[in-house]
Amino acid sequence: QVQLVESGGGLVQAGDSLRLSCATSGRTFVNSGMAWFRQAPGKEREFVAAINSIGASTSYADSVKGRFTISRDNAKNTLFLEMNSLKPDDTAVYYCAASVRFGAVTTTPDSYDYWGQGTHVTVSS
């Protein structure tokens, strides 16, 4: 059974930092592009950051560029999202995703085949 399990979310104040993790199991994703998406209450799911299979290429949404860093450890089957200078607008459920069709960076949800259940991030002002 393939699983992507996010962790690291929580309630923080504006300006704080959080590190999200996404542990994968059930199959290898070393050839897979992976990404983080988020969905705020009442809004559609949106792209946050993506990374290619070997971690050499990344892409970020303009809203998080310079504050968030995506990385991966293929030896530990884990994806990370380091979030700094958090803002109330970053409040959302954060989802990790993996693609079995694309090893390159992709930013559209349709490119991803496996999704985690999400972890809540709440940033208070």
Image: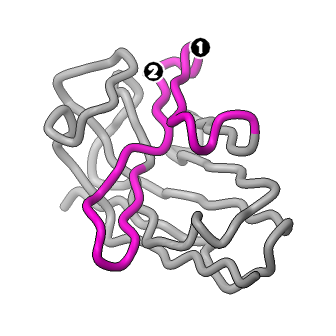
Q: Nearer the viewer, residue 97 or 39?
A: 39
Residue span colored magenta = 37-66
In the displayed structure, would residue 31 be above or below residue 91? above
The circle drawn on residue 52 is 2
Q: Is residue 26 left or right of residue 79?
A: left
Marks 2 and 1 in Cβ contact (< 8 Å) = yes
**Element type where label 1 sits in the image:** loop
- SS for dot 2: loop
Q: Residue at x 63, y 36 (%)?
A: 71
Q: Which mark is residue 76?
A: none
Q: Pick whichever, 78 or 122, lies toward us.
A: 122
> What residue is shown with label 1?
56
Q: CA distance from mark 2 to mark 1?
A: 6 Å
Quarter of the view holding residue 62: top right
Q: Position of residue 55 (x, y in %)?
A: 57, 21
Q: Quadrant of the C terminus?
A: bottom right
Q: Is residue 103 left or right of residue 36?
A: left
